[in-house]
Image (cartoon, coloured by chain):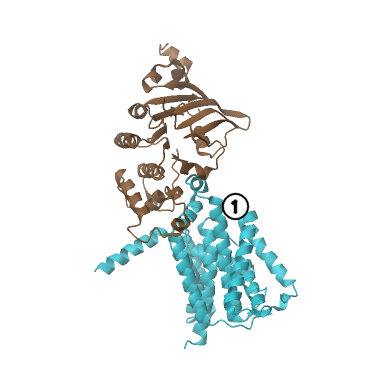
Chain colours: A brown, B cyan
Amino acid sequence: MAVPILQINCITKFFGGLKVLEDVSFDLMPGQRFGLIGPNGAGKTTVFNLLSGVYSVDSGSVILANQDITNLPIRKRIGLGLSRSFQNIRLMPHLSVLENVMMGQHCQANRITEMIKPIGWTKNNRWRQRALETIKDAGLEVDLNSTVSELPYGVRKKIEVVRALMSKPSVLMLDEPAAGLNPQETIELAGFLRGISDSNVTLLLVEHDMNFIHAICEKVVVLNFGLKIFEGTPKEVNRNKAVLEAYLGTSAMESSGVT
Amino acid sequence: MMGGYVEGIIAILCINLIFAYGIYLTAASGQLNLGGAGFQAIGAYVAGVCSNYFELPIVFSVLGGILGAGLIGFLISFPVLRTRGVYMVLATFAFALVISGIILNSEFLGGATGMVVPAYAPVEVLIFSTFIIILIVFWLMASRVGLAMRAVHDDDVVSEIMGVNVKGIQVFAFTLGGALAGLSGALYAHHYSFIEAQYFNAVLSIFVLLFVLIGGTQTAWGPLFGASFFTLVPEILRLGDTEWRYVIFGILIVLMMIFRPQGVVTRTFVHRASKIFYRTAER
């Protein structure tokens, strides 16, 4: 049997006296497209923040490619193949599109010579070439020298995905990548993400748009009030009573006749 | 060759430019250093001591000034970088006051009567040093280190997630910034041959931070503009009505702050200017 690329074992997180995640466990297989869903406040983004190290795990462990990363410093995680985007876009507002994308390569420039070589002066610099290729593959048509704060929402959202891809991740975590996109853009993004997944990148998506989840994900975990209430395929999730209760509430289900 | 007046302006412009780049490096990575005068004083006095007491040649005494200020910058960066925003401004400001206080009370350094530094560095040395420093800073800002510094300025958490050693970058910027301010002080000591604690005062720290903030912290062109503007414009205004020149200068600063609150030279500005430049060059 294949070894999971990312194992989340019984992670628990408290914010003061409030337990926001309790004993959440799931495994991601290499190349799998995985959805993490749940009502607002269920703890989805908290899972992302625990995996990327922004928050520390109170108990439990996170294993990435057989290596325990539970207490690894934040900046070392991207080099091991864990890359993420943010729910509310967090690009560097004063950097240009190209510079933002090139920030995603930072973890690969390990030697001091790579750090002090000018990357903005010569056109045929290899870092720059790779950034330009990835931007082109993603179908991002935008003035690369424009400052990102001047760009529309949809474009910035896409730049964030491209930036996350630049580190050549083995696990790519995207927090609501389709939020705020129009239907056409959502379809394009789904196609793009499937393409990424075909090159053996594992996807972990937090998303509210169920059509998007159905279009992409092979497996779904549902969180509610910090607990895992379901794990299975997107088809099964629609029929699961606990999930429907969590989203619609018991009374709504009774009045609409769903049992 | 040059007239004494012009030479004097060029010398102070060179010192101000190097000084401004020192403060710029910390500002570019998101830290405000209001202790500039303190670092400049350390550079000046270390160079003075190396030259007077150890009788080192100018090259080595200046190097001593750079290393001395850089080392102090490195050491105080750790407590200072624990603070943020206005608290960091206050912490660095207090640092400059402490340095000034130490010099004033030290008999060895000449106390309030100052120190004479006879070894003379001509203006050509200042011009050459400034040229080298500008090149180094432009180079640095075009490198991945520079990119990381600007990323830390914008969002330190995301920078850390991207793999940047945020603390390391901040300490590096603070140390190198201190070293550059030290270089400007060492050159000041050797060019003017006289240093006193009263010169390295709070107003000087405020001025150099203004050079950088009004010039803009987004690109390495910012301090070049800011320091040149603050050094040259009052001199140019001298040609006209002497009585009103500081009033006009003040109004210019207020106008810049109203219309360019993010600094006069921004990335967008440089981008557009270079586009126009290339278009004209193609014709």
Foreground residue among B143 and A235: B143
Q: Secondary structure at mark 1?
A: loop
Determine the chain carrying the residue at label 1: B
The residue located at (43%, 42%) in the rendering is A89
Task: Examine the rendered structure and indicate whether residue A112 appears above or below residue A49.
Answer: below
- Residue closer to the observer: A165 or B80: A165
- The residue sitting at the front extreme is A1
- The residue labelled by disc 1 is B84
Across and down, in percent, residue B152 comes to 50, 52
**Which of the image's four quarters has the C terminus of chain B?**
bottom left
Of A72 and B249, the residue lying toward us = A72
For residue A219, which quarter of the picture? top left
Q: Nearer the viewer, residue A5 or A164?
A: A5
Residue at image x 37%, y 61%? A121
Query: From the viewer's perspective, is A185 left or right of B247?
Result: left
Number of marks: 1
Where does residue A86 sit, x and y in percent of width and height? 45, 39
The residue lying furthest to the left in this view is: B283
Q: Is residue A140 above or below residue B173?
A: above
> Tag 1: residue type?
Arg
Q: Is residue B220 visible?
A: no
Left or right for A195, reference B198: left
Is A33 situated above or below B147? Answer: above
- Badge 1 density bin: few <14, some 14–19, many ≥20, Cα 10 Å: some
Residue B26 percent across, percent down from the top left: 54, 59
Asked if one can make out residue A133 in the rendered structure from this viewpoint, the answer is yes
Q: Is residue A66 left or right of residue A119?
A: right
Q: Is residue B73 above or below residue B233?
A: above
- Residue beneath the point at 40% across and 33% down: A203
* Percent position of residue A57, x then y: 57, 34
